[in-house]
Image: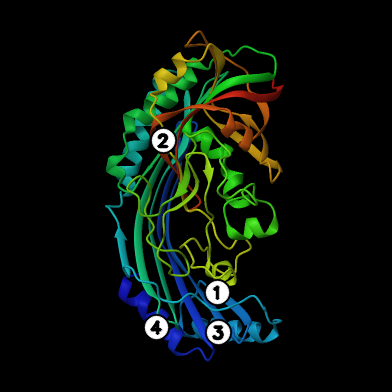
Amino acid sequence: MNKERILEILNYVVKNTQADEVEAVLMGGETYLTGFANNYIHRNVGEESYELNVRVVLGKKIGASSTSNLSDEAINGAILNAINIAKLQKENPDFVSLPKNYPGDNEFIFVAEIPDAETRASIVKKLVDASKKYGFTSSGKFETERFQLAVKNSLGVERYMERTASTLKNIVMTDTSSGFSEVSKKDFREIAIDNVLEESLEVARMAQNPIAIEPGKYEVILSPYAVHEFLSSMKYLSLSAKNVEEGTSFMKGHFGEKMFPDLITLFDDGKSDETLKMGFDFEGVPKKKVYFVKEGVITDVIYDSFYAYKEGKEPTGHSLPQPNSLHAYPMNFFVGSGTSSLDEMIANVERGLYVQRFWYTNPMEPVTLLITGMTRDGLFLIENGKITKPVKHMRFTESVLNAFKNCLEISNVSKIIYEDGAVTTAPYMRIKDFNFTSATEF
């Protein structure tokens, strides 16, 4: 669907909705996936789909409805449903207004060429052929999308965005090990296929026939994949004004306090060149760069319009599609990079573990961000500054806050990791006294 048709739909909704305030959000686009498993392509699919969300305000009553059917009848039905739902609601005394039209560009285009099915298959073939050569098996995906988002409300907001993203993921399996690599870029031609292949194959090859070691506290180097997974709970438990109000955030009562070493900086920046860009949020508010932690000091949180206006502040451009239980979320999250190379970080470890990836991570204590999970796709012993042996996987139970306090080094390179529409830009991190609680049989 082109921009003109999308804005035509939004204009119709705002013009024809009888309410004190109205917001129309249309999102969707094209998605294509080439999936492979056991050295064969088993899926090659594509779709174009859109969803229209209508939110209306009657006094302090709010109603919302959505439809993926964009016929005139369905759109009128969504408008009527939103109004009827609003009439049935109790008044929300904390609601002030939908967001006003803040200064900023009204259009953001971050697009590149979309690869066709033949191109995707040819890239996957390189991964599969390499695995076959070594007697291994590859599984993964090559997924690409063109995402469109447009927001219009009765207070003057009208913004439109297009973004492309391509992700290549490869998991290499042997009889006793696995290796993982993933990369996401705006332009699929920027994906270094050889690097993806080399990383996944080398980790799988090195991880064969792992040894068992005793659980306990180890100095670790976490890859960007592991950092991303380890910090995933923090992004929805800690970093928004709602989290602070509800008491799940470690930041509550600590703003302006130095809690971590200087090398810990966390922020969100939707307009950085080191992310998959997003110019505004799902309420049409331009994105601001927000520091959560700056050189170890607790600084700020993100706001949607509801919590911003409730607290007498301005929204930061981090709203999710409303209504939403999370309200605001960091869609372009960064762990600030450091000054060390990965080789330097490994050389500085006398005895420890290199972690390629975590999975099945879950929070146990929200405020301390005590997380449990397991290693996956490569765990290695480091001795006297060198990776020496593969290790059987282990379960960890560790606090994100303790890990930050125990962080010794951060790499000077980062990786963009794209998952479910959100982006994390993460480096390697070297952390002391990381707690592993049990071992596995594999």
Q: Nearer the viewer, mark 2 or mark 3?
A: 2
Q: Nearer the viewer, mark 3 or mark 4?
A: 4
Residue 66: assigned label: 1
Q: Earlier in the sequence, mark 3 or mark 4?
A: 4
Amino acid bearing label 1: Ser
Per the model, the C-alpha gap separating discs 3 and 1 is 9 Å
Q: Position of residue 247 (x, y in %)?
A: 70, 54
Whether residue 133 is situated above or below residue 171 in the rendered picture: above
Per the model, the C-alpha gap separating discs 2 and 4 is 43 Å
- Whether residue 431 sits left or right of residue 396 in the image: it is left
Per the model, the C-alpha gap separating discs 2 and 1 is 40 Å
Amino acid bearing label 4: Asn
Q: Are marks 2 and 3 in contact (CB under 8 Å)?
A: no
Q: Residues within 10 Å of mark 4 (few under 14, many from 20)?
A: some
- Secondary structure beneath dot 2 equals loop
Q: Nearer the viewer, mark 1 or mark 4?
A: 4
Q: Position of residue 4 (x, y in %)?
A: 31, 76
Q: Nearer the viewer, mark 2 or mark 1?
A: 2
Q: Earlier in the sequence, mark 2 or mark 3?
A: 3
Q: Residue at x 52, y 91 (%)?
A: 18
Q: Position of residue 257 (x, y in %)?
A: 57, 44
Q: Earlier in the sequence, mark 1 or mark 4?
A: 4
Q: Which residue is tagged 4? A: 11
Q: Residues within 10 Å of mark 3 (few under 14, many from 20)?
A: some
Q: Are marks 3 and 4 in contact (CB under 8 Å)?
A: no
Amino acid bearing label 3: Gly
Q: Which residue is tagged 3? A: 77
Q: Earlier in the sequence, mark 2 or mark 1?
A: 1
Instruction: Answer yes or no: is residue 191 visible.
Output: yes
